[in-house]
């Protein structure tokens, strides 16, 4: 009898010792989004550096850098009901690879998306974002108002004087790009990751509502409030269905 | 009797299950639990980003100790050189052909070996992406000209190294391959501990020091469009760790080809890695070829010496400043004053980095 008891005790310990105390995990009601952003210049897929595109002002233009933030993401289930994703997203269009993971999105069908390009007021404060190399390189100096660059779009263009560089840098809260809501249907399934594709037409940064002409509006926009306002307005419809 | 035997067998099996059920595999890479080295806790300013540590070469107390010894030891070379022959602590570990008087066509001007734990690539043209592999390149004819058979024999005979390699990396029997790899790993670990984050500028950021009027004026130039230094040398590391053509040349050949040498792409001609400006006042001469002797020479380049080319960084071409910043002589001096606040003097004498031999 004692033998049976000891054996039972040992077997019991053996098969229960490593068991976690956690109860069964709750059934997931959320899923994730793998956000992929595709870049076009009008109908053509955007190629950096080696390919020229004609911007609205008529200049042959190539792009060598395009970094920006998205914040204030809202995924709409209906005309008025939405899920707000409040973590800013950093995007580097040139070194873009596998997508950006947005976690814990409630399961269900979504029909449209709204967002800011840049950082909303809550996040556009010096040192408010994690100390990643990307965020550090996007800092907007305190001497110029603090916070972060919303966008860095750089490259070269050709005019009658030859090849020139341009650097469209956007920052300061008054220049946040309040992007209009656009159609974007997808379904999030509980416990799964769904790939959601956004398409940006980079040509729109140079037109609509305002023509952006490097030689008139500036090769370099940082600290040029008029140029930055123009860029901000043009950015309101760069994402398309 | 048979029944007792079976009872014994079942009982023993049960006990074995109890004591073995949760056991981890402690025999990873032939390193036993007792031999596992002690993790090294890297200390750095809270506003620095996470350092880049390769998973295959985590920092350990034993690895850093071994790396420090090897950095200072001529045992690795066949020409009497050690790493420290070129990288002097009191010069912020810079390597300068002008200091050494070596063949300037072969030996480049290397930025200081500080804050390398944050570099995504190494050298002016980023030819190496893992710090862990960089030291091994010194075994070649340019630097150590090492006869590896001889080096191996010397290291194996050494009173301490065999035990240290075992403690740090679990190497039981050194071969040329393990010696090269683990030497490189150990020195990389040591280099990652050399952190410059105690300059006057750091004290200023922590509200523990005030800048002089000149330094403050220089800071405003540095962090505004006037000087526009911050785009490539901003953040706590004072570098964006990216490649730029800053208009040093408009004809690219030889050592001026820059990143093109690695990528072969036309648009990379004349681009070089932006070095950290930490300890910049200590690390003359400047640029990849050491062409500028003083900080004033460097600023005068940005002020009025920028040469236009197809790959010139767009940041360098502002309206009205196409060929330079147009700073006054007072503004140049103010900027130099501010650059001098980046000096971390503690590194120069820190006993943790000194010669332990």
Image (spheres, helix red, strand yellow):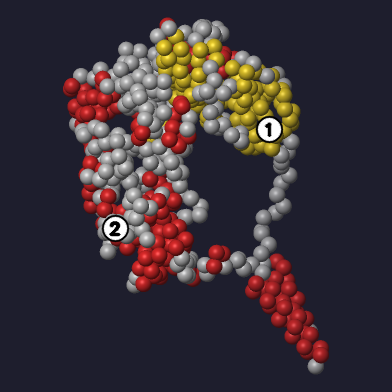
Q: Quadrant of the C terminus of chain B?
A: bottom left
Q: Secondary structure at mark 2?
A: loop
Report in which chain the residue with disc 2 lies: B
Query: Visible in this render: residue B224?
Result: no
Q: Residues within 10 Å of mark 2 (few under 14, many from 20)?
A: some
Report in which chain the residue with disc 1 lies: A
Rendering coords of residue A128 (x, y %): 45, 33
Q: Quadrant of the N terminus of chain B?
A: bottom right
Q: Which mark is residue B230?
A: none
Q: Nearer the viewer, residue B64 or A234?
A: B64
Report, in whole angstroms, how far the alpha carbon at label 2 lies from the one at label 1: 58 Å
Q: Which mark is residue B79?
A: 2
| Residue B260 figure quarter | top left
Rendering coords of residue B270 (x, y %): 38, 29
Rendering coords of residue A59 (x, y %): 49, 10
Q: Residues within 10 Å of mark 1 (few under 14, many from 20)?
A: some
Describe residue A190's horizontal placement relative to residue B94 as left or right.
right
| Residue A117 figure quarter | top right
Residue drawn at the location 34% of the way across and 60% of the way down:
B76
The answer to whether residue B135 is above or below residue A197 is: below
Residue drawn at the location 60% of the way across and 66% of the way down:
B25
Is label 2 on the same chain as label 1? Answer: no
Q: Nearer the viewer, residue A21 or B64?
A: B64
The answer to whether residue B111 is above or below residue B60 is: above
Describe residue B308's horizontal placement relative to residue A98 as left or right.
left
Residue hosting label 1: A195
Query: Visible in this render: residue B146?
Result: yes
| Residue B78 figure quarter | bottom left
């Amino acid at each position: 009898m004692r033998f049976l008891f000891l054996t039972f005790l040992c077997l019991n310990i053996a098969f229960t010792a490593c068991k976690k105390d956690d109860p069964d995990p709750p059934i997931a009601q959320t899923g994730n989004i793998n956000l992929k952003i595709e870049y076009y210049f009008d109908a053509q897929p955007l190629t950096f550096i080696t390919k020229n595109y004609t911007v609205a002002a008529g200049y042959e233009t190539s792009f060598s850098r395009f970094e920006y933030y998205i914040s204030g993401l809202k995924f709409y289930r209906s005309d008025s009901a939405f899920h707000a994703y409040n973590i800013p997203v950093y995007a580097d269009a040139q070194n873009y690879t596998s997508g950006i993971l947005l976690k814990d999105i409630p399961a269900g069908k979504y029909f449209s998306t709204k967002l800011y390009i840049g950082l909303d007021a809550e996040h556009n404060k010096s040192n408010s974002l994690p100390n990643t190399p990307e965020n550090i390189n996007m800092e907007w100096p305190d001497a110029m108002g603090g916070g972060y660059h919303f966008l860095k779009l750089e490259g070269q263009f050709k005019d009658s004087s030859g090849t020139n560089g341009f650097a469209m840098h956007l920052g300061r809260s008054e220049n946040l790009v309040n992007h209009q809501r656009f159609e974007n249907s997808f379904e999030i399934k509980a416990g799964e990751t769904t790939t959601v594709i956004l398409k940006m037409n980079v040509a729109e940064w140079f037109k609509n509502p305002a023509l952006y002409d490097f030689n008139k509006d500036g090769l370099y926009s940082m600290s040029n409030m008029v140029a930055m306002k123009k860029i901000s307005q043009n950015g309101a419809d760069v994402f398309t269905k | 009797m048979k029944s007792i035997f079976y009872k014994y067998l079942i009982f023993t099996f049960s006990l074995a299950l109890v004591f073995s059920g949760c056991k981890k595999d402690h025999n990873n890479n032939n390193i036993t639990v007792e031999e596992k080295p002690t993790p090294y806790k890297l200390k750095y300013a809270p506003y620095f980003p996470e350092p880049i540590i390769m998973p295959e070469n985590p920092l350990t107390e034993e690895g850093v100790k071994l790396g420090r010894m090897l950095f200072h030891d001529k045992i690795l070379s066949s020409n009497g050189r050690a790493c420290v022959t070129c990288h002097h602590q009191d010069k912020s570990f810079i390597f300068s052909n002008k200091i050494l008087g070596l063949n300037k066509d072969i030996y480049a001007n290397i930025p200081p070996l500080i804050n390398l734990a944050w570099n995504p690539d190494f050298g002016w043209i980023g030819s190496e992406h893992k710090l862990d592999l960089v030291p091994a390149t010194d075994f070649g004819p340019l630097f150590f000209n090492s006869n590896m058979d001889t080096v191996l024999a010397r290291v194996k005979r050494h009173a301490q190294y065999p035990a240290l390699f075992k403690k740090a990396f679990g190497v039981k029997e050194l071969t040329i391959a393990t010696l090269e790899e683990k030497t490189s790993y150990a020195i990389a670990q040591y280099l990652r501990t050399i952190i410059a984050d105690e300059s006057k500028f750091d004290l200023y950021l922590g509200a523990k020091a005030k800048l002089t009027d000149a330094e403050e004026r220089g800071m405003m130039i540095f962090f505004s469009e006037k000087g526009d230094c911050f785009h490539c040398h901003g953040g706590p590391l004072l570098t964006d760790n990216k490649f730029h053509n800053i208009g040093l040349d408009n004809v690219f050949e030889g050592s001026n080809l820059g990143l093109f040498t690695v990528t072969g792409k036309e648009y990379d001609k004349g681009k070089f890695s932006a070095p950290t400006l930490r300890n910049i006042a200590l690390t003359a001469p400047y640029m990849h070829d050491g062409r500028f002797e003083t900080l004033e020479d460097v600023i005068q380049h940005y002020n009025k010496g920028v040469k236009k080319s197809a790959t010139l960084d767009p940041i360098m071409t502002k309206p009205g400043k196409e060929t330079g910043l147009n700073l006054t002589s007072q503004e140049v001096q103010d900027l130099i004053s501010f650059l001098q606040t980046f000096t971390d003097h503690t590194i120069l004498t820190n006993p943790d980095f000194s010669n332990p031999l």
